[in-house]
Image: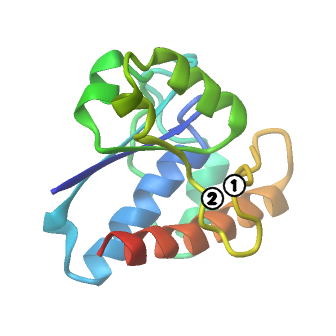
């Protein structure tokens, strides 16, 4: 079983969307039993909150529910998960700083590492933008989710 956690800053926009889209994709393919998924954030400012309403609304427009509850990343996450997929460089640096070994550091990868349009790019944070920013993030995350599922299966 592949254990994957998606990590962004507050765990209310990008990482819960990535978790939901990945879950949807593996359910569509009938392979959800092969994965354990979660999401978290590096700042913990929204612990216990649902995903941002704009993220949920945009995802629902595509028939995707985003049910996750925000939480802060822990040292246990770094040990437990096989892959820690980070949404931007700042989050990547923060997660890497929590690692205690090269083995742990090797599990921390930018979510868009294999994006053919923009390899190793960040998933933009839609927090300060309008609805078009949330749609843009949805499309980026959807495309990269398919890339990851294809690579892992």
| Image vertical order of residue 40 relative to residue 38, above or below | above
| Image vertical order of residue 20 relative to residue 81, above or below | below
Colour scheme used in the picture? rainbow
Quadrant including the C terminus: bottom left
Picture residue at 68% right of the left edge, 41% below the top:
88
Q: Tell me, yes or no, if residue 9 can be seen here.
A: no
Picture residue at 54% right of the left edge, 17% below the top:
97
Can you give x and y, in whole percent of width and height, for residue 76 in the image? 27, 21
Judged left or right of residue 77, residue 124 is: right
- Mark closest to the chain's N terminus, 1 or 2: 2
Q: Tell me, yes or no, if residue 19 can be seen here.
A: yes
Picture residue at 53% right of the left edge, 25% below the top:
96
- Looking at the image, do the residues carrying marks 1 and 2 touch, with CB atoms under 8 Å apart? yes
Picture residue at 60% right of the left edge, 33% below the top:
92
Quadrant including the N terminus: bottom left
**Residue closest to the eye, 125 or 85:** 85
Q: Residue furthest bottom?
A: 29
Q: Which residue is mark 1?
A: 120
Q: Which residue is mark 2?
A: 112
Q: Quadrant of residue 114?
A: bottom right
Judged left or right of residue 16, residue 91 is: right
Can you give x and y, in whole percent of width and height, for residue 15 in the image? 52, 45
State the SS at label 1: loop
């Amino acid at each position: 079983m592949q254990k994957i956690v998606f990590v962004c800053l507050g765990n209310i926009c990008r990482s819960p969307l990535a978790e939901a889209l990945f879950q949807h994709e593996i359910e569509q393919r009938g392979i959800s039993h092969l994965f354990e998924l979660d999401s978290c954030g590096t700042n913990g400012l929204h612990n216990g909150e649902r995903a941002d309403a704009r993220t949920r609304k945009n995802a629902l427009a595509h028939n995707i529910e985003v049910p996750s509850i925000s939480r802060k990343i822990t040292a246990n996450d770094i040990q437990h998960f096989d892959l820690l997929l980070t949404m931007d460089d700042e989050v990547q640096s923060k997660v890497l700083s929590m690692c205690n070994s090269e083995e742990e550091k090797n599990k921390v990868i930018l979510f868009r590492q294999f994006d053919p349009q923009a390899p190793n790019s960040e998933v933009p944070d839609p927090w300060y933008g309008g609805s078009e920013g949330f749609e843009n993030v949805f499309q980026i995350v959807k495309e990269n989710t398919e890339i990851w599922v294809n690579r892992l299966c």
